[in-house]
Image: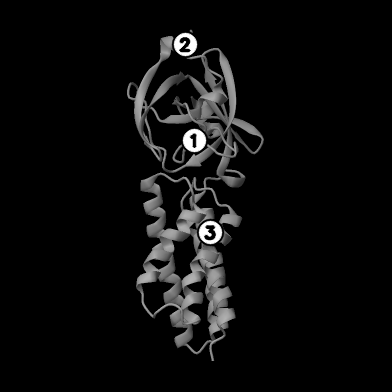
Amino acid sequence: MVDGDAITLGTAGLSFLTLRAVAAARPGIRWRPGRGWAAAALGTVPLVLLLTGRLGSSSLWMLAVPPGMCVVAFPGLARARWVRVVLATYGGAVAVTGLVIVLLSLGMTAGGALGAAAAGVWLGGRGLARATRPPWVVSGGLVRLRLWIGSRVVEVHALVDSGTRVRDPATGRPLVVVAADALGLEFDGPPWSMERRRVAVTTAAGSTWLDVLSCPHAEMEVEGRWLTLPSIGVAVSARALAFDGSFQALLPAHLGPRTPGQQRGA
């Protein structure tokens, strides 16, 4: 006899851990456990309807579950990044389902198979987080930056984002996207008007142009020390980058601070 409650709870737990592993495998995606549980609960709705006889036995509803879960768990992603996250969630769901089927074929009970699969996904997620997250990233994928712009030094919190790959069209250097409010810039007067140039970017809101400013020096805090970043520029966003104000900049994930040896040799 199938214990519907246990299967539903086990499925919700596996969905939560799968989404968590997907977030861990893609640096720059902020993981919010509350949204993760809400998405996992959404993913169990078709299963509950199936077990109660209110949904026919069909695989079509399964195709709609991962995109719906990703909408809830990862709001605000640009379209291209969201598609990649959905595909990763599909892959994770297929892998987890296959693992549960194998464990059941080996004679394990449904509860045991779900528990073992959950443990495997949890360990896999931790391994992915260690493998993909740079050692200088702190809680929530955030880092502290100091940017030298004109005669000012601006300090911001930046989200490490694998989807940010914009470059300065004049120099080819990577660009850190920073909210204008965090810089406190007056674009109508010097010295900013003398430095202004623009770069075309595509965001979640569509295509737009961002002003680009020179940044002759930038530093990142690593374990209480400020280390020099490779040469960068600053792209200024007129809009806030985080709804909750938790970060004011987007840092390309491939950038990292120079090691002490590199800094001495510079």
The amino acid beneath tag 2 is Asp
Report helix, strand or loop for mark 3. Answer: helix
Amino acid type of the residue tagged 1 in the rendering: Leu
- The residue where tag 1 is placed is 250
> Whole-Å distance between the Cαs marked 2 and 1?
24 Å
Mark 3 to mark 1: distance in Å? 21 Å
Q: On the picture, is 45 further left or further right than 153?
A: left
Q: Residue at x 45, y 76 (%)?
A: 99
Numbered disc in front, either 2 or 3:
2
Query: From the image, which quarter does the N terminus lie in?
Result: bottom right
Residue identified by numbered label 3: 20
| Crowd tier of the residue under label 1, counting other residues whose Cα lies within 10 Å: few below 14, some 14–19, many 20 or above | many
Can residue 136 be seen by looking at this rendering?
no
Q: Which residue shows up at 56% across the image and 19% down it?
A: 184
In this orientation, does residue 252 appear?
A: yes
Q: Position of residue 3 (x, y in %)?
A: 57, 85
Name the side, left or right, on which 4 lies relative to 206.
right
Provide residue 20's location: percent of width, then percent of height.
Answer: 53, 59
**Could you give the CA–CA distance between mark 2 and mark 3, rounded to whole angstroms?**
44 Å
Counting residues from the start of the chain, the first of labels 3 and 1 encountered is 3
